[in-house]
Amino acid sequence: MFKRVLICWLLTSQMAVADDEIANWLRQADGFRLPGDEVQVETEIRLFKKGELEKTREYTVFTKPGRRSLVLFRSPNEAGQKMLLLDDKFWIILPSSRRPVRITASQKLLGEASSGDIATLTWSEDYNGILKGEEEVDGVPCRVLELHATRKGVTYEAIELYLAQQDNRPVMANLFVASGKLAKVAHFEMGELNGRRQVVAMKLVDRIQTARITEIRYLDMHPHATPDKLYNPAYLIRNDISR
Amino acid sequence: MTRYPLALLPCLLCCWHPATAEWNAQLRLMPEYHRVNKESAFFVPTEISGFEKRESRQELELGYRNGGVNGQLLLRNEAYSGGRSQNHTLLNELYWDTQVLEQEITLGKKVMGWGVGFGFRPLDVIQREDRRRLYPVPQEGIPLLAWQGFSDTGAATLVFANPTHGEEEQIREDASLALKVYRIAGEADLHGVARLSKRQQWEIGAGISRVLDDRFEWHGSLLYQRHYQRLINPLTERGGIPLATSDPLRMETSHDGIKALIGGSFTAPDGWSLLGEAWYDDQAYSRDEWKSLFALSGRQRALLGQAGIPDEAVYSNIAASSRYLQGENLLRWNGLARLAYEGERFKPYLDLLYTPEDNGRVLTLNLEYEYDRHRFDFALRHYGGPANAVYRQLPEQWVALLVWQWGIK
């Protein structure tokens, strides 16, 4: 009996260590995507269909701890549009109506580039994971993590994340929607931005509409303190947010 | 109206930072087709009314923002049948969002939409958007001075609209004081509004928008108006010769008006969505009021060709009554169903506006196609229902519209 209890205790504590380690790996991976807690990101999205560039879109994203993100749409056809993401709540303001509208998670996903792909830049706050195994991706030895959402409203319910064994930088991710379907495969490109080695681009290959590829390129990313009121839906009607 | 933008010029100069100035420009070309409804109770032959069908609209929209100063200028050209064209320059917005003593202040001409709803927005007390348009045009703002305060889960906005005006010809130009309070309560957004003006005295309303799960949401809003105004044709209540020698319509004030809307929507992750709404508007005319107006129009039309009564006098009286058709809602009870799909390139929608009091129907089909900076819309609308339905009395039976929009910058 004592032996069984001891084995159980050893196994449980082993799992707890593993959980902590995985959380640590995720935080390190997040560090390659975001340079700090409060960040301003200038993003360019290029949409390809059958290898041809179809659209280019530009966004400014402000993020703040507490799962708060504000997306400003910058392209000529979308100028004035904003999307606010507060935890699992979402609002949009369209230039034609000039009033913030509460939207559902499904409405958030609409449009050519999911706002979740643009605004969500971390995993450690939203997912728990287990180590699934080890695999080589494009010659890089990786550990494979199986992540499951711990909160409502995330864009992807589950993620199969490939982190480089050497430094836990993200290499690839399989992104699954709530139905369990593989929606997209993400490939991460490392580079230098403002003198810092980090993820500079993410290529999303759509597995449902297979001819479609979305390239999200981070043009600039720097720490930027923003006041809390910026993440109030009523603030969306104001236009004094400077880039 | 031009005084406010001029007063803002010093602010514009103060905030001028060439490095942070942002411009955007959009060009829209919109040829359109209208099929005239000769069966309308208010039909007046073109040779008498001088009415010209609009054949196209061209717009250049210029937007500017810099350090809290925002502006939108619209240059519009409208071409009519017969070769005539009209040009308009509209300064839709010029305002300054700034902080004074750590308070959020807005000064200038700004679009301020407070409504909750899609087909109708009872809480739009500062300015009302024309929701019946086949293709929306950029809204023109209201001169105002506004204060906003924010908390963690809410906000309050106090607006002094048209501060140098009194009671003007148009309600939207009246001086008024309005307050909006807003609060996030879990999965719901709660809205409260109040407006005070000389003409309408006080209006007070509340709204809710609640997300049920990832796909469903519902919303509702209710507005009470102490006073509201409508155009009335007194000839509908009079015997004798049903003609007036001057404009017969007069503005009548009524009391204790209600505007209410309830609706909900379902959005699937694959892009399909369905919206349903029902609303009531006391400010719209009742079915009985329309029947009286149709009867008057019939009596007036019977006078055509009679000796001693010029046809022009008859037609000008009929045309005056047709101004009943300019209301925000044509009948008190309305229902809207809208099926839409948001695809990669194509975004079609089909919507049906239904007036149960007379079985009137407005069916709209829109197909949007987007390619990089170009957007194309094809819209088709049909006004249907029984011959005596109010929507069948509009001057047109079919409208088709093609839009090319180019995001230049």
Image (cartoon, coloured by chain):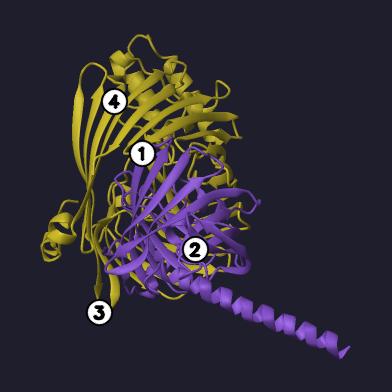
Chain colours: A purple, B yellow
Foreground label between 1 and 3: 1
Q: Residue, x 21% and y 64% (percent of image)?
A: B67
Q: Do the residues labelled 4 and 2 touch (CB within 8 Å)?
A: no
- Under mark 4, the amino acid is Ser
Q: Name the residue under label 1.
A: A53
Q: Name the residue under label 3.
A: B101
- How crowded pointer 2 is (Cα within 10 Å; few <14, some 14-19, many 20+) is rated as many
Chain under callout 3: B
* Residue A98, image x, y percentages: 37, 53
Is residue B406 visible to the viewer in this orientation of the structure? yes
Q: Name the residue under label 4.
A: B56
- Under mark 3, the amino acid is Leu
Chain under callout 1: A
State which quadrant residue A158 falls in: bottom right
* Residue A36, image x, y percentages: 38, 74
Distance Cα–Cα, label 2 vs label 3: 27 Å
Q: Mark 2 points at which residue?
A: B191
Q: Quadrant of the N terminus of chain A?
A: bottom right
Distance Cα–Cα, label 2 vs label 1: 43 Å
| Badges 2 and 1, same chain | no
Distance Cα–Cα, label 4 vs label 3: 49 Å
- Under mark 2, the amino acid is His
Q: Quick check: B227 left or right of B91?
A: right
- Residue B257 vs B246, above or below: the answer is below
- How crowded pointer 1 is (Cα within 10 Å; few <14, some 14-19, many 20+) is rated as few
- Residue B215 vs A30, above or below: the answer is above
Q: Quadrant of the C terminus of chain A?
A: bottom left
